[in-house]
Image (cartoon, rainbow, N blue to C red):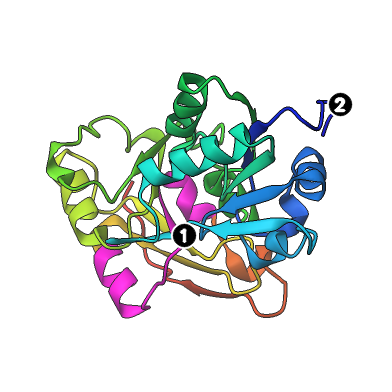
Amino acid sequence: MDNYPSLAGKLWLVGAGPGDPDLLTLRAARLLESADIVVHDGLVGAGVLALIPPHVERISVAKQRSRHTMKQERINELLVREARAGKQVVRLKGGDPFIFGRGGEELDAARAAGIACEVVPGITAAAGCAAQAGLPLTHREDASAVSFVAGQCKDLTEQDWSGLAGHGRTLVIYMGLATASAIADKLIAEGVSPGLPVAVVERGTTPEARVLRSLLADLGDLVARERVASPALIIVGKVAARADALDCLGTPGISSVLKDISCEY
């Protein structure tokens, strides 16, 4: 594998991208072909998994809200054990390993065990979903800064998001569906305009993708009314008004819900 001796076990933390197999990097695809074992999470697209050769062992460690197939500590132990056995181990993670993927924890575990480890970046959901929706995360007229946050933390009120959304800024919220109403309330309480545009991208980069657009004050109602399913991304900021699925997502099977109302920003 990449000229490393076959007897030397190694761990590769590989980003699978946001779902579309065509967005997988060439390096990631090559590693899948030469791996001994692939340990993958539940956000890896079916098209990407189909690229794994039949002879390569697969282990799913899919996580869902409030239910983990395998605890993170056990995943770390599994990766170290297989690499110590001399295997070329690919840890395949949705998006990018270092953006809300716990790749840093797995890298720490490998280093502590003396296991060689390399990180292969992937297209994170924010970049992939926004691109598909024709939504620029930065724009000279709308936003010169962009921030990524996780919306499923246990106590949302303790997170300091002040200054991350509003004039000239874009806020991208991963894993925020279950707390969408609380997120809107939190941002408004911190001074963000209730009329700031928001976009929700459901199952981004897949044929089942939907782009929904509304205002911050209506975010919770939108998610509930449209029964948005995970995985989905919430984008808050003036740039969200530029998302137009009807124009940008012409692929059959992709639908959009656009709420054309006057945005107060």
How far across and down, in percent of the image, does residue 242 sit?
Answer: 54, 53
Residue, x 32% and y 33% (percent of image)? Answer: 164
Name the front one of labels 2 and 1. Answer: 2
Is 4 located above or below residue 37 in the figure? above
How far across and down, in percent of the image, does residue 97 sit?
Answer: 54, 38
How far across and down, in percent of the image, does residue 102 sit?
Answer: 43, 38
Q: Which of 82 and 168 is in front in this view?
A: 82
What residue sits right under mark 1 in the picture? 62
Q: What stretch is highlighted in magenta?
A: 219-242
Residue, x 74% and y 42% (percent of image)? Answer: 28
Residue, x 59% and y 74% (percent of image)? Answer: 208
- Left or right: 40 as drawn, with respect to 54: left
What residue sits right under mark 2 in the picture? 3
Mark 2: which amino acid? Asn
Q: Nearer the viewer, residue 93 or 192?
A: 93
Does the magenta run of residues contain 237? yes
Residue, x 67% and y 62% (percent of image)? Answer: 248
- Left or right: 162 as drawn, with respect to 104: left
Mark 1: which amino acid? Ala
Does the magenta run of residues contain 251? no
Residue furthest to the right = 3
Which element is circle 2 on?
Answer: loop
